[in-house]
Amino acid sequence: MITPAYLNLGDTVALISPARYMEMTALKNFQDWVEANGWKLKTAPNLGAAKAQLGGTTNQRLEDIQWALQEPSIKAVFCARGGYGTMQLVSELRKLDFVGMPKWWVGFSDICALHFTLNEKGLVSLHGPMAMQFESEEKCSIRSRAQLSASLKGESITIKIEDQESDQTPFWVHQTRAYGDRFTAPLWGGNLSMIYAMLASGSTPPKEPFILFLEDLDEYVYHIDRMMQALNLSGVLQQAVAVLVGSMCDMHDNAVPFGKNAKEIILDFCKYYNKPLIWGLPCGHESENIALKLGLDITFDGNYLIQN
């Protein structure tokens, strides 16, 4: 995998909107954060365009991706927001040479369609906060912003793992230790709904063993089971060394309950295959959204998740 060059003072970053449209009133806070890091911001030619929910027409959104890709001064490309829209671009994204001019592509949720395309081409990308979240600390915490900066500057990520479950443990629990206290492999995944969709489009996970990362928002629990069944039937779960789960928020059930919550569904699959599961990483659709480098090795040493 190719890791793009990390950012230095004076570098230029870009902002595009390949999914839902960018509300331009939110731009200032993001621009302030960029400038506070000593970087310069260029906005895409079509940023602010809107076609219904989308950030412009298909052609406008593709043009902005091509503009950011081909502009040599741009070292990192941030996405404005998720929602829906990136999947519409995948057939054209697969034709682009992202590796010839490697740079960081940053986003999550719907942007995972772009991440999977980049990772398949052999390029590391960054699953992390997007510009619209910089509207407030409730949408993107100070810690998440600082850690996003650190990741783009090449600093390592370290997350303490608590090895017990309780109401007082808000984020993480190491559920199983089938592989012992340690594992290392490249990180792959992101939004579960997007993994499900991209597998249907012909995308494939890495051929070598990997650590599967999942998070999702606003789904019925039976949908979670259906998507996990698909990951099982496609061989993804069998190939995974371990499973890391970020936020699974705003889940729903029917009037007649499904009988399991999202955590129980995923844990049952991990138990069946004897896979280690770390639940509740501060990554995903919450104010705590720690950036993770997709395609790069991540290690659990028995106490910490570490990614250099």
Image: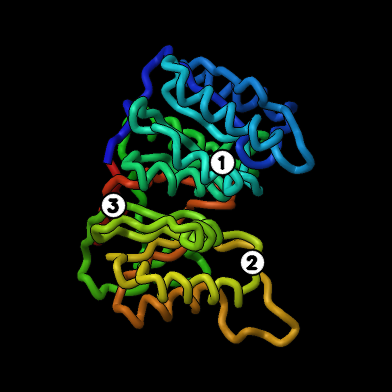
- Badge 3 element: strand
Image quarter of residue 269: bottom left
**Amino acid at circle 2:** Glu
How many C-alpha atoms fall within 10 Å of the one at disc 3: few (<14), some, or many (≥20)? many
**Label 1–label 2 contact, CB within 8 A:** no
How many C-alpha atoms fall within 10 Å of the one at disc 2: few (<14), some, or many (≥20)? some
- The structure residue drawn at horizontal position 42% and vertical position 81%, both measured from the top left corner, is 268
**Label 1–label 3 contact, CB within 8 A:** no
The tag on residue 141 is 1
- The structure residue drawn at horizontal position 45% and vertical position 38%, both measured from the top left corner, is 95
Q: Position of residue 296 (x, y in %)?
A: 30, 45
The tag on residue 219 is 2
**Amino acid at circle 3:** Pro
- The residue to which callout 3 is attached is 186
Image quarter of residue 7: top left
Using the image as rendered, state which of residue 219 and residue 118 is in the foreground: 118
